[in-house]
Image: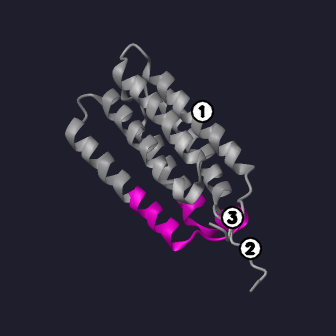
């Protein structure tokens, strides 16, 4: 029975694209002005909160850009990934502390790179590529102290901006009824 409703697999890629562009800019800005802090925590914290609230929290952006709603499974996977990310970042901060801010921020970059892998379920294969690039970038910074942190942060931000722009132009594919 054809209801005329087309189910789509990845409905909010454009919303996530806006988020990636925004957060990429915030990361670069926070790194450029941070000095010995590596990432300026006020810019990163307030920037993250404001962007999360305006882009992902308020329905206006998503209603304007999304092609529909995520499935319950996609929402559940997104929530699990966010919870795991918060837990891992908290543990990272607790274990590393503020004695080695470079390592702390690089480990947070690593965790964020890994967290994108779980967004495969709601955003598609592009998240696996994004996550892999960000993980490699963070690992280069962790294992090669000669690479300036600012370079790692700018690469992280630019990769997010690039993927965000790509996602802004994406249209979700209909879900196949044949498996």
SS for callout 3: loop
Which residue reaches farthest front? 179
Question: Cα distance, mark 2 to mark 1?
Answer: 34 Å
First reached walking from the N terminus: tag 3 or tag 1: 3
Residue carrying label 1: 158
Q: Is residue 146 left or right of residue 17?
A: left
Q: Nearer the viewer, mark 2 or mark 3?
A: 2
> How would you rate the neighbour count of disc 3 (Cα within 10 Å): few for under 14, some for 14-19, many for 20 or more?
some
Question: Which image quarter is the C terminus in?
Answer: bottom right
In the rendered structure, which disc, 2 or 1, sits on the residue that comes first in sequence?
2
Whole-percent x, y for residue 41 in the image = 40, 40
Residue 6 bears which disc, if any? 2
Instruction: Please tell me the numbered disc located at residue 66.
Output: 3
Badge 1, how many Cα within 10 Å: few under 14, some, many 20+?
some
Q: Quadrant of the N terminus?
A: bottom right
Instruction: Indicate the secondary structure of the residue bearing disc 2.
Output: loop
Visible in this render: residue 149?
Answer: yes
**Region rendered in magenta:** 53-82
Question: Could you tell which of marks 2 and 3 lies nearer the N-terminus?
Answer: 2
Q: In the rendered image of this protein, does residue 61 appear above or below residue 1?
A: above
- Residue 33 in view: no
Query: Considering depth in this image, is 73 or 78 the residue closer to the camera?
Result: 73
Q: How many marks?
A: 3
Q: Kindly indicate the quadrant of the structure image that contains residue 109.
A: top left
């Amino acid at each position: 029975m054809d209801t005329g409703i087309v189910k789509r697999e990845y409905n909010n890629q454009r919303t996530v694209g806006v988020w990636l562009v925004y957060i990429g800019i915030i990361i670069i800005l926070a790194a450029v002005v941070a000095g010995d802090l590596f990432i300026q925590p006020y810019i990163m914290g307030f920037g993250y909160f404001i962007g999360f609230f305006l882009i992902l929290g308020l329905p206006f952006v998503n209603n304007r850009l999304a092609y529909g709603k995520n499935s319950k499974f996609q929402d559940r996977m997104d929530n699990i990934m966010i919870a795991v990310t918060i837990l891992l970042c908290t543990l990272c901060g607790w274990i590393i502390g503020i004695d080695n801010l470079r390592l702390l921020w690089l480990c947070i970059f690593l965790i964020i790179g890994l967290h994108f892998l779980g967004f495969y379920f709601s955003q598609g294969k592009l998240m696996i590529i994004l996550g892999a690039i960000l993980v490699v970038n963070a690992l280069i910074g962790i294992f090669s102290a000669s690479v300036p942190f600012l370079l790692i942060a700018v690469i992280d931000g630019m990769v997010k901006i690039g993927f965000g722009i790509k996602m802004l132009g994406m249209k979700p594919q209909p879900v196949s009824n044949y498996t």
